[in-house]
Amino acid sequence: MTTAMKGRGALSQPPGRFDKLTQTLEHDGWYEDEPERRVETVVLPEPARSIISRNNSPDIHFTQSINPYRGCEHGCVYCIQGDTPILMADGSTKPLAELKERDAIIGTERHGWCRRYVKTRVLAHWSVTKSAVRITLKDGRALVTGHDHRFLTERGWKFVTDTTAKRPTLGVYERLMGLPNSADVQSGRAIEGQVVTTASSLSISSIEPLNREMQLFDITTGTEDFIANGVVSHNCYARPSHAYVGLSPGLDFETKLFYKQDAAKLLEKELAAPSYKCSPLMIGANTDPYQPIEREHRVTRSLLEVLLRCRHPVTITTKGALVARDVDLLTQLARDGLVRVMFSIPSLSNDMKRALEPRAASAAARLKAMRTLAEAGVPVGLLVAPIIPILTEHEVEDVLAAAREAGATAAGYTMLRLPWEVKDLFREWLAEHFPDRAAHVMSIVRGMRGERDNDPNFGTRMKAVGPFAELMRQRFRLACRRLGYAAHQKPDMPTNLFSPPRRTHPQMGLDLGS
């Protein structure tokens, strides 16, 4: 049985979702003393061409974010050509480039041994410029897509191509899953509830690299897939991101860390662009900006120095007490109302912290850092995240009271979410630390998520649904009112103070003649 390692959250090293090979340990019958299980942390630079990520999610209060690190010691690119017809919920089609968030489209869901067409919605929409490939089917249908896009075949999800030789890829003559006849794509008939099938017409005739870069588009949907020109196509957010670079979302996420090289220079470059439009930046949306390696690498501090020079508004979310180190910069930003720091504290219990967030600062240390910033005039807030049924939900009012006493003026919460890579790791963690309550916890989680482990839909993914979720909503609202928290969590930060960095150009020589 897998046992927990001291100072680590994940118990195991599951393969990434794209790995072709997996390994299983077998005992050979020889007995010997087992050495203490330890995994050293490895920190590597990650070259990056840009630093600001953007989103248009209606249930997230920021549109721009920066993650100084990939991975976190505390504890996607899938695109298709813009004119590709996407199957809408009403049976019509619309070019991929013209889709908008919340558009109703057709996706698929597994029901028992089969997969059926269902209605879903577009959650996000974006484009990139990248090298393209043309896939041609037996019936003449063509798809122009990126090398790393995935399509559903008779044998599961496969990539178009793969340079790492680790991931399953498409081959000529292989059959894709979808609408058998090309005429069905434009027929306008309703297919909701029908079984997803294949046919000889969906066999791949050729896969041709176009040897040029093109503007390609992609979407995120509630079912994590969509129908592109009649073919089932995949779309695909901190542990899951490791799967896309060939690493495990388990221990690798905690022990193989990457810091963004030249992050401050990249930020200056993007802020100096004539097309840049100032809006508050979030630092730490995906991984913690004040995890232990920040003490040495100081990437987050370098970003704050740029933002201070430019008088750019920023919100920070962290579990780290190290944020108090940067009180000098944060105080200067706070004078113009350009900063707020949100502390994530799911529990006041040291025992729970050791199990749930083994390398994060203790709740007492976070509250001390919160008080330090508040007394220096920096606005601070609380995120009770995640709230775990049975295990931490009983502490919500106590956490709110402790943070309010430490100076927090705003508070929010998130119910436990279990994306694809995290769900099995969480079940494993439950079985190790709370075996007597594991079944009860998961029963409530699934009850809040439509009898699934996770619900990716806007409006419900953060706060969940059902009786338990509604009870938590009422408890949180009443506690905030009693303790005097602000009614609105979204900060009102000025953008008119922003002064972009001066763009630098190479100096040109003067021809003065001879």
Image: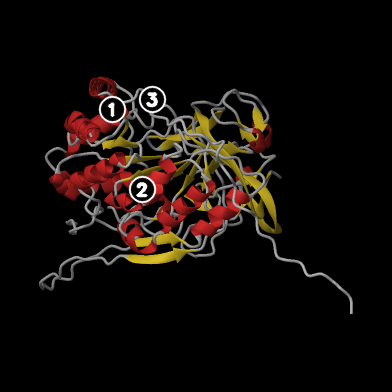
Q: Residues within 10 Å of mark 2 (few under 14, many from 20)?
A: many
55 versus 449 height, above or below:
below
State the SS at label 1.
helix
Q: Amino acid at mark 3?
A: His
Q: Crowding near pointer 1: few (<14 within 10 Å), some, many (20+)?
A: some
Residue holding disc 3? 488
Q: Is residue 170 left or right of residue 412?
A: right
**One can see residue 155 in this view:** no
The percent position of residue 399, horizontal first and vertical second, equals: 21, 34
**Whole-percent x, y for residue 279 in the image:** 53, 38
Would you say the residues marked 3 and 2 are in contact, meaning their CB atoms lie under 8 Å apart?
no
Q: Nearer the viewer, mark 3 or mark 1?
A: 3
Identified by mark 1, the residue type is Gly
Name the element at disc 3. loop
Q: Quadrant of the C terminus?
A: bottom right
Q: Eyeballing the image, is 182 above or below 129?
A: above
Confirm or deny contact between disc 1 and disc 2 (CB under 8 A).
no
The residue labelled by disc 1 is 447
Which residue is painted at 64% across and 49% down in the image?
A: 273
